Image (cartoon, helix red, strand yellow):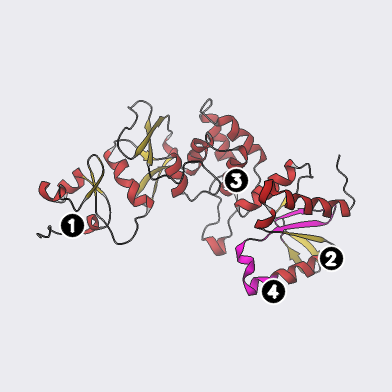
Amino acid sequence: MRIPKQLPGRFQSAPFTWQEALDAGVSRQRWRHRWLDSPSRGIRSPAPEQPMELSTTARPYTVITPFSAASHATAFRLWAFPGFLPGSHESVIHISRPDTMAIPRRKGVVGHVGQFFEDEITNHQGLLITSRARTWLDCARKMSIDEITVVADHLLRLPRPEFEGRSDPYCTREDLETMLDRHKGTPGIRKARLALEQARIGADSAPETRLRLALECAGLPEAEVNMPTELGSGVVRQPDLWYSEQRVAVEYEGEGHSDPGQIVRDIEREEDFSRAGWILVRISKRHMGNDASSAVAKVRNALINRGWAPK
């Protein structure tokens, strides 16, 4: 069996367009070789040993379609947004272009058109993509209000520079408000407005946001989010949620809390709250099923124990 001529550099591990192949000196015969996959018209892809990154897979679709950028569910995944977006697991690539042009139509693509301001398209890992704020709005149409809030909390969260290498949030509240004001009447904007109203700065994870929303939906008072709390001389803790009047703190404990070292730290934390006269309510994934009914019951009981009464 005749072995085909080796492809130039990056073409051996990433999809490429016909124009890119032509510019690199790839022959028409090599372009048509059966060892290359044809995911869409004018695009060829090798069969790399390792799965390709989504940004690598999506790039040629934006290159071959003029004035386009990855958007919607594809941008949602590329930005690693938390929250549930129906259809975001699908293998199709979502791309958008200005509404003065024809909607993109090709195999493997879901095309969109819309009005875009200059700062709503950015470069991410060598790929043109809608900004985080624009992606948040674009995806709102298919998401529930609570899940849109989960993403909003993620964008507004103040990072921890020592762990994340950044000091600014991905977006400010003004950034998201500006996006809503720019695109009045776009599908999903009403849900996005309601989500932004209930978004708060401070949640460190999607489960924390879902817990906060579940507690508020159940009629419990609104909790403070991730605020440093002085429990004694030199003792400061920062619970996920806390009710200062009732001296009740709530912590959501993810999978990392099963680590032996973390277990010791969790015990020390609980002892700190106890010595200061606080009740610490510990919530895990198993409490979040059935609309977080178990989590709500635990927090409600703690609040009632401290004198709070439902209205």
Residue 302 higher or lower than 115, as above or below:
below
Q: What stretch is highlighted in magenta?
A: 238-265
Mark 4 vs mark 2: give the one in front: 4
Which label's residue is closer to the chain start, 4 or 2?
4
Which label's residue is closer to the chain start, 1 or 4?
1
Image label count: 4
Q: Nearer the viewer, residue 242 or 211?
A: 211
* Quadrant that contains the N terminus: bottom left
Mark 2 vs mark 1: give the one in front: 1
- Where does label 1 land, which residue? 8
Q: Residues within 10 Å of mark 3 (few under 14, many from 20)?
A: many
Q: Does the CB distance between marks 2 and 1 fall below 8 Å?
A: no
Which label's residue is closer to the chain start, 2 or 3?
3
The secondary structure type at the circle numbered 3 is helix
- Where does label 4 land, which residue? 264
Q: Residues within 10 Å of mark 1 (few under 14, many from 20)?
A: few
At label 1, the amino acid type is Pro
- Quarter of the view holding residue 149: top right
